[in-house]
Image (tube, coloured by chain):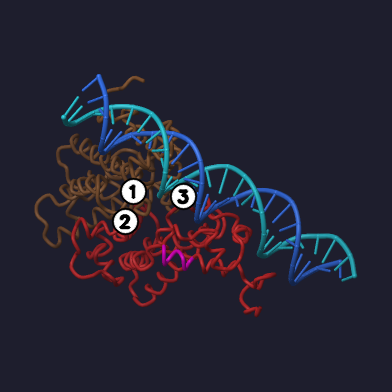
Chain colours: A red, B brown, C cyan, D blue
Amino acid sequence: MDHPDQQEKSYHHGDLRRAILDAAERRLTESGIDAVTIRACARDAGVSPAAPIHHFGSLKGLLSALAARGFEQLVARLDADLATRTGSGPSLLIGAYVAFAVSSPKMFDLMWREDVLDPDGGDLSCARRVALERLQAHVKPTQASGDERIRAIRAWSIAHGLATLLQHGRMQKALGAPGSALSTTQDFATLAYDDGFTSL
Amino acid sequence: MDHPDQQEKSYHHGDLRRAILDAAERRLTESGIDAVTIRACARDAGVSPAAPIHHFGSLKGLLSALAARGFEQLVARLDADLATRTGSGPSLLIGAYVAFAVSSPKMFDLMWREDVLDPDGGDLSCARRVALERLQAHVKPTQASGDERIRAIRAWSIAHGLATLLQHGRMQKALGAPGSALSTTQDFATLAYDDGFTSL
DNA sequence: CCACTATCTAAACATTGTTTAATTTACGCG
DNA sequence: CGCGTAAATTAAACAATGTTTAGATAGTGG
């Protein structure tokens, strides 16, 4: 009935594309990837199953748009965390990366589930490139000699590995909880490496 | 007709459980996780869809049994690689871990896809524990002080992160191919860290 | 006012996991 | 040997999914 003046106020619904994406994100964070389904999101939005397909092409398209949102959220988080501290450095960046993964586990999962995502191209590819460039910019702040690149690989690897393993809960079960509960960005940063950038 | 005297020569088929698992593994490595399906594996084995369910309980049960195979293959690989070199150390272990992930990408994927695996308990839980204990035994060879545990976390994180990112092909796309093609265990070991155990 | 195109619906199709009841087969035991 | 019991397997059905098709609807531009 009422048309809330949102972004691209479309023909019938107003902004069905956004409504479906919102439903998908809600389902993702609350119930996991398997719960975000064409038909369920269509039900949530009160439309027929063919409507989401018209907007996103396929389930992969919908999930890809959702993952693009995730990369945008990651960039926002990195920027926010890096703004609070002056001396940036890769350690804090790793901490922020891991903190995002732990605070948004389902979304982080989706972002790397390439089997359910559309092959490269489109909004997802763009959002992902932005996020990874942001990461690289802070990991190798000056130029990229051969050694620098190796260092960047190590920093990214340790961040991604720590995020993945923490998320799966395997690390706690295998190694025991390392001291207090891990939550802040600084916790993950020191866990990643506490002896500064040069040692890694 | 002929009963090949395999393991538990069962009632009708001889060893249907193994036959289904073999079909599942073939489908996994050749076509990916989505291709290993109750009905497809049943077709491959020439039985009805309810037969795999009887042996594995559900699709999750089948995939869990398959992942258990994967962890057994991982420990075999770790043992084989560690046997060739005398001074073990964590560097070589990381290399072997990453080499397994790169040489068996689909299987490595499945092993950490907990959303399609049965919750802990059963053969998978056992096989996984064996593998992770093997990893820990080499990462912290003596005792586990607080600092040692942090070091183990870092070693495992860098191994898992490097494996995951290499597998997704994101690292090559983002950072460019780091020199020659990476294939041997030693390549991954030096990529992980070349300054020995103490520096990490 | 009239084409036109973007949205959306309704209905169908093929495929999947799983359940149910029934059937076939092997084994243990008298 | 024979019988009963339990395991293994099948056939048929059910609900749910992604996707396609044809058609209806509504807003836009000429």
Q: Residue at x 62, y 79 (%)?
A: A4
Q: Chain of mark 1?
A: B
Pick whichever, B137 or D18, lies toward us. Answer: D18
Mark 3 belongs to which subunit? Answer: A
Q: CA distance from mark 2 to mark 3?
A: 19 Å
Instruction: Tell me whether circle 3 and circle 1 mark residues in contact (CB < 8 Å).
Output: no
Q: In this figure, which residue is indicated by the disc labeled 1?
A: B163
Q: Is residue A122 magenta?
A: no
The x, y position of residue A153, in whole percent, is 35, 54
Q: Is residue A26 magenta?
A: yes
| SS under mark 1 | helix
The residue type indicated by label 3 comes to: Asp
Tell me which residue sits at (48%, 62%) in the image: A130
Q: From this viewpoint, is residue B6 visible? A: no
The prevailing secondary structure element of the residues shown in magenta is: helix
Reading the image, the residue beneath label 2 is: A161
Residues behind callouts 3 and 1 on a single chain: no
Give the answer, above or below, for where A8 lies relative to A56.
below
- Where does the image place residue A162, in percent across and percent down from the top left? 30, 59
Q: Position of residue B150 (x, y in %)?
A: 19, 60
Read off the magenta span.
Answer: A25-31
Tell whether label 1 touches label 2 (CB within 8 Å): yes
C7 vs A184, left or right, is: right
**Mark 3 = which residue?**
A115
Distance between the alpha carbons at the discs numbered 2 and 1: 8 Å
* Crowd class of label 1 (few under 14; some 14 to 19; many from 20; radius 10 Å): many
Could you tell me which chain the residue with mark 2 belongs to?
A: A
